[in-house]
Image (cartoon, rainbow, N blue to C red):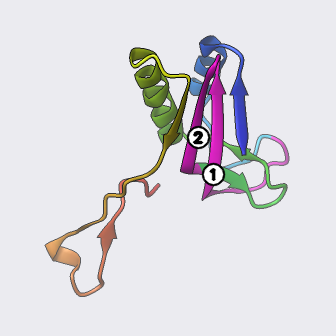
Amino acid sequence: MEFIFKTYADFTDEYNRYNMDKCNKCKGTREVVEDKVIVIVENKKMNFEKLLLFQCTNCGEKCLPMHSKDMIDGCYKTMIEQNQIEGIFSWKGYRKKFNYCQAQEFLYDYRDY
């Protein structure tokens, strides 16, 4: 999956658009999926090994949820600060067990919607 934004302002327009659980194209239901994603903002290329997306269960259209847009924005700003053109970003994982869910083997994942 690839998302291309000619300018940072174009990305900001997408960032300010809040995607809901209904597809804008066919009104089908969207579900959260993980996918390999390439995002290009201006001349900065970000390769995400795993990024959360919304995908329509009816037509298959994919779009960015807010959490993923926050990640992209942070990566873009880091690339600007470090004067980088391309970067590979991977999820390091945060899976914490809490005492109150030991019997069910509950693992906390901050990415859960």
Q: Position of residue 3 (x, y in %)?
A: 70, 34
Which amino acid type is marked by label 2?
Asn
Direction from residue 60 to residue 72 in the image, left or right: left
- Residue 5: mark: none
Q: Residue at x 60, y 14 (%)?
A: 8
Instruction: Give the residue pinned by disc 1.
Output: 36
Indicate whether residue 95 is drawn in magenta. Answer: no
The part of the image, by quadrant, that contains residue 110 is: bottom left
Which amino acid type is marked by label 1?
Lys
Instruction: Give the residue pinned by disc 2.
Output: 47
Direction from residue 38 to residue 65 in the image, left or right: left
Direction from residue 57 to residue 65 in the image, left or right: left
Indicate whether residue 40 is drawn in magenta. Answer: yes
The part of the image, by quadrant, that contains residue 38 is: top right
Q: Earlier in the sequence, mark 2 or mark 1?
A: 1
Q: Position of residue 113 (x, y in %)?
A: 47, 55
Q: Which residue is at the front of the view, 54 or 74?
A: 74
What secondary structure is found at the residue carrying circle 1?
Answer: strand
Q: Is residue 74 above or below residue 97?
A: above
Magenta segment range?
A: 25-52
Q: Residue at x 80, y 55 (%)?
A: 60
Q: Which residue is at the front of the view, 29 or 105?
A: 105
What secondary structure is found at the residue carrying circle 2?
Answer: strand
Distance in Å between CA atoms under marks 2 and 1: 8 Å
Q: Which residue is at the front of the view, 52 or 91?
A: 91
Q: Position of residue 58 (x, y in %)?
A: 82, 59
The part of the image, by quadrant, that contains residue 103 is: bottom left
| Contact between labelled residues 1 and 2, with CB atoms less than 8 Å apart | yes
